[in-house]
Image (cartoon, rainbow, N blue to C red):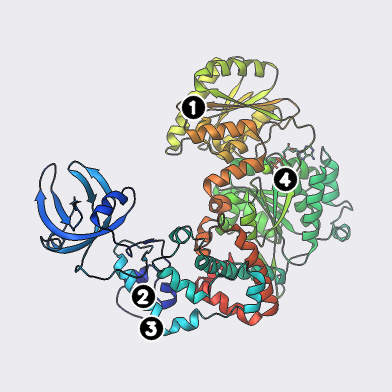
Amino acid sequence: MTTKRPPTALEKMGLNSPMALALHLPSRYEDETELFTIEEALGLGRFHSIQTQGVVIRNQVTFRPRRQLLVTIEDDTASLQLRFLNFYPSQQKQMAVGANVRVRGEVREGYQGAEMVHPTVRAVTPDSPLPASLTPVYPASAGLSQTIIRKAVLKALQDASLKESLAEFLPTKLMAEILPSNDWPPLQDAISYLHQPPADANTQSLLERTHPAWRRVQFEELLAQQISLKRAHAIRRERRAPSFEKDRQASKAKKTNASIEDGLQKVLPFELTSAQARVWSEIGLDLSNTFPMNRLLQGDVGSGKTVIAALAAARAMDHGYQAAIMAPTEILAEQHYLKMQEWFEPLGVKIAWLSGSLKAKEKRLAQEMIESGEAQLIIGTHALIQDKVSFAKLGLAVIDEQHRFGVRQRLEIQQRVGSELFYCHQLMMSATPIPRTLAMTYYADLDVSVIDELPPGRKPIATKVVKAARRDEVISGLHDWLAKGLQAYWVCPLIEESEVLQLQTAVESFEQLTQALPNFKVGLVHGRLKSEEKAAVMAAFKANEIQLLVATTVIEVGVDVPNAALMVIEHAERFGYAQIHQLRGRVGRGSADSVCILMYAEPLSLAAKERLQTLRETSDGFVIAERDLSLRGPGELLGAKQSGDAMLRFVDLQRDAWLIELAQTAAERLLAEHGDLVERHLERWLGSRTEFLKA
Ligand code: ADP
Ligand code: MG
């Protein structure tokens, strides 16, 4: 089946079978079914496209103000000027004086009266029939005209094989029980309808994709997704993972009688909140299973997720397995490393640190410790996934701020024990709530635990929004603040276009603040520092040797210095919701009243104004995530975008949320009652794209 010829433009778009073409559905339609007289068009054609027809009475190329083609057409009622700024000789010929043309475009007021600029033009005879259906406009690519796609689709729709591929096989009874109404056409009819809607079709619902024909297609697509998710779920449950039961660990704990978990509970300087205790028991139950955990621990910034990760790691270690904790940035990973050292080293736990910026030799040493099993707990950045570290016996992987890694980077660590393949338990942690629609679709195979309570004694963060013009006032307030023995952060503006520029402004602010606050030690931390340098600055800040920390957004996540309860964010208008929320979460961790000052430069866009206002009014992560979501759409969250696009082509999770539940029910029933149909359905919808199901 190897062909030598290069792929056609259609094939390049994946339109290489009748089925693929049938599912290449229009993005919109043009109504060429209605024809207006020129007089009517002059009145109706303002602000929307209209079709009219006439005889050419003038065809002239003028050169002022620039080369252009002016054509006038006329019918019994009036005349209309057409203007073409770019044109081919063939067009000029097509519109020769005396020719009959059908044109379509918007009418607008030009210098010489009403005109159409660049209308679409079709040569006709006075009695050429009008098409009976709306004209589809397809997603296209460069070098692929609508005409070619239309022809190919029409041909595909006649193809005998389609009868089979689009045959109705979902049981009528099941559909009737599940679907909300019976006006959804059978699949084949729905598809034909969408390619060639009749002249009187409800164009609005077609455009908005809420038409019953669209609903039918969307439902089927979601059904395929739900089935494949349920399968992935079943597959996971068939996989083996080491079971970490609490009761059994005492006998397994080596040498000492005390388990690491009990030891950790003892060294912790606080009691778990009841929310933490609840999620820990959920996770503990997962860990005792013989199939791998796949759980997301969701909790607002500062809710105390780290200790849960530590407890889970302790349990794995008590069973003689390794645990790994990964974070998206070096700073965050280092914070974890420091915390884990503080908690675990007194208990004799061996910890390995692995990050991208380690020297080759240090890296090799760390890797040896990990490979030999000497390291019980491994902390690091993405490097842990990217460098294909081989673990001696990994039982648990914790991935902090999981959404930053993206779906693709989800790790699949497995190891052979005897003849059996073992997978490790996975715990993802995130401060970003998953919207329900995503939880039911892309993340359906993810169990979710939520910490919905902050540790006691937290004072709410007072957020103030201040003009940059009042910078001096802010600095003098900062002076008073530091004089009370408290610490503070100064966050420099995000400059997305240029890291160099970002660094430069950070250095400037650092110098200015050093001068303005001579009695205090000011530190600077940014992304360009070596990891030891960063660690040194952070350690000095933690030890209160530095009182004011000037930082770029590298401190965005995870940094934990309770005595630092004031944060100033410069150019807050440049940050998104989530970023400010994360940043602000760095303060409000101690018992002092916390303050966050959002400084902004004018002029402020409407969106930025609304954003700052919301952030001032609420510090509830759910509310903020919702605002964020309505702005950006769910695809961008949690890295779902890439794989999401590929799997759902016709469904919009926000618009079609209510369909998800129907599809879920249908998938369950289909799997339970009609197992034989499941394959067929998946094949129809996913065909060669089944690779996405493994994600
Ligand atoms: P996040 O969920 O944002 O990762 P952390 O795990 O960093 O939050 O916890 C934030 C702070 O709260 C840390 O200083 C941590 O030691 C503290 N903390 C966590 N749990 C409790 C608790 N139950 N009581 C008091 N302080 C806690
Ligand atoms: Mg954290």
| x 77%, y 57%: residue | 316
**Which is more foreground, mark 4 or mark 2?**
2
Q: Amino acid at mark 2?
A: Leu
* Circle number at residue 507: 1
Q: Position of residue 618 (x, y in %)?
A: 65, 34
**Which is more foreground, mark 4 or mark 1?**
4
Q: Give me the C-alpha separation between circle 4 and circle 2.
A: 56 Å
Q: Secondary structure at mark 3?
A: loop
Vertical placement of 682 versus 466: above or below? Answer: below
Discs 2, 3 touching: Cβ within 8 Å: no
Mark 2, ligand 2, within 8 Å: the answer is no
* Circle number at residue 1: 3
**Which is more foreground, mark 2 or mark 3?**
2
Mark 4, ligand 1, within 8 Å: the answer is yes
Q: Give me the C-alpha separation between circle 4 and circle 3.
A: 55 Å
The N terminus, quarter of image: bottom left
Q: Position of residue 621 (x, y in %)?
A: 66, 41
Q: Give me the C-alpha separation between circle 1 and circle 2.
A: 63 Å
Q: Position of residue 137 (x, y in %)?
A: 36, 63
The residue under label 2 is 154
